[in-house]
Image (spheres, helix red, strand yellow):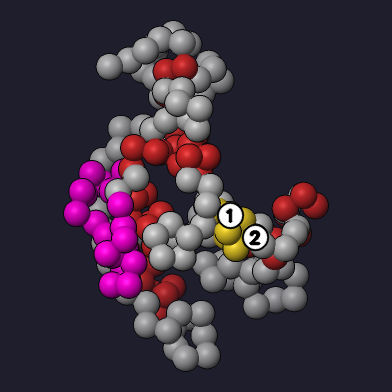
C-alpha cells in the first residue's frame, strides 16, 4: 500500500465499518505524524483487524459492501487456509511485517503492490507455496519474497532480537542463532 495512504485518505479504509463518516475513528486515532499526503513510490504495511471470525463472515462483509457505487466491485476470496506459521503471535506477525516493508520499501504498481504483498503474506502464514496475486496483470512479474518477512532489513535474524518479545524464540537467549 502507498506510504501514508491511511492518513492521506483521511483515515478511510474499505475494511472498516465507519469508512463513510466524515471523520473515521481510525483517523482520530492516528498520531499527527501519520496524517500526511501519500507517497506513491513508497510502501507501507497496514493491519486492520476485521471483525470476522471466519471466511463466511468476511465474505458477508464484502458482499454487504459490493456493487458499482460501493467499496468492492466484485469481491472474491481467492485463498483461505488455517495458519500454519509457527511464529504466529501478534508481536511475531507485526515483526514480520516490519521486516518485509523494511526490505521492500518501494511501491511499484506492476510488481510490488498490495496484491504481491497479500500473496507473500498468505504464503508465509499458510505454507501454501502456489498462492499468486489475484489479478492476472500482476502474475507475470510476481516473485516470491516470503523470506523477507523473516529477516530484519539489516540482515539480522529472528534470534538477534532483544528479549522484549512474547516467547516466540522458544526460550532461546537473546543473540542466540537458531537453525
Q: Which residues are magenta?
A: 122-143
Left/right placement of residue 86 relative to residue 155 reads left
Residue sitting at x 21%, y 49% = 128
Q: CA distance from mark 2 to mark 1?
A: 6 Å
Can you say whether 74 is above or below 114 in the image?
below
**Element assignment for label 1:** strand
Residue contact between numbered discs 2 and 1, judged by CB atoms under 8 Å: yes
Image location of residue 14, percent across then percent down: 54, 71
Can you say whether 25 is above or below 178 in the image?
below
State the residue position of label 1.
42
Residue sitting at x 30%, y 32% = 86
Image location of residue 164, percent across then percent down: 56, 20
Mark 1: few/some/many CA within 10 Å (<14, 14-19, 20+): some
Which mark, residue 140? none
**Element assignment for label 2:** strand
Any magenta on residue 171?
A: no
Whether residue 102 is visible, yes or no, is yes
Whether residue 48 is visible, yes or no, is no
Residue sitting at x 60%, y 63% = 40
Please tell me how many numbered marks the rendered image carries: 2
Image location of residue 92, percent across then percent down: 45, 33
Main SS type for the magenta part?
A: loop
Residue that sits furthest to the bottom in the current view = 68
State the residue position of label 2.
39
Image location of residue 83, percent across then percent down: 29, 45
Can you say whether 21 is above or below 32 in the image?
below
Q: Which quarter of the figure is the C terminus placed in?
A: top left
Left/right placement of residue 81 relative to residue 115 reads left
Residue sitting at x 51%, y 23% = 165
Residue 109 versus residue 28: which sits nearer the camera? 109
Amino acid at each position: 500500500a502507498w506510504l501514508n495512504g491511511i492518513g492521506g485518505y483521511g483515515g478511510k479504509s474499505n475494511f472498516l465499518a465507519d469508512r463513510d463518516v466524515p471523520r473515521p475513528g481510525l483517523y482520530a486515532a492516528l498520531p499527527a505524524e501519520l496524517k500526511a499526503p501519500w507517497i506513491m513510490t513508497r510502501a507501507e504495511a497496514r493491519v486492520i483487524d476485521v471483525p470476522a471470525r471466519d471466511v463466511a463472515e468476511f465474505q458477508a462483509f464484502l458482499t454487504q459492501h459490493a456493487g458499482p457505487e460501493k467499496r468492492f466491485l466484485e469481491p472474491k476470496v481467492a485463498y483461505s487456509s488455517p495458519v500454519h506459521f509457527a511464529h504466529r503471535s501478534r508481536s511475531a506477525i507485526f515483526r514480520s511485517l516490519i521486516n518485509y516493508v523494511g526490505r521492500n520499501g518501494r511501491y511499484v504498481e506492476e510488481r510490488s503492490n498490495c496484491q504481491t504483498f497479500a500473496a507473500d503474506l498468505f504464503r508465509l502464514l499458510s505454507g501454501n507455496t502456489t498462492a499468486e496475486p489475484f489479478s492476472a496483470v500482476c502474475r507475470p512479474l510476481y516473485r516470491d519474497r516470503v523470506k523477507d518477512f523473516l529477516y530484519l532489513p539489516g540482515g539480522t535474524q529472528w534470534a538477534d532480537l532483544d528479549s522484549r518479545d512474547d516467547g516466540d524464540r522458544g526460550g532461546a537467549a537473546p543473540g542466540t542463532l537458531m537453525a
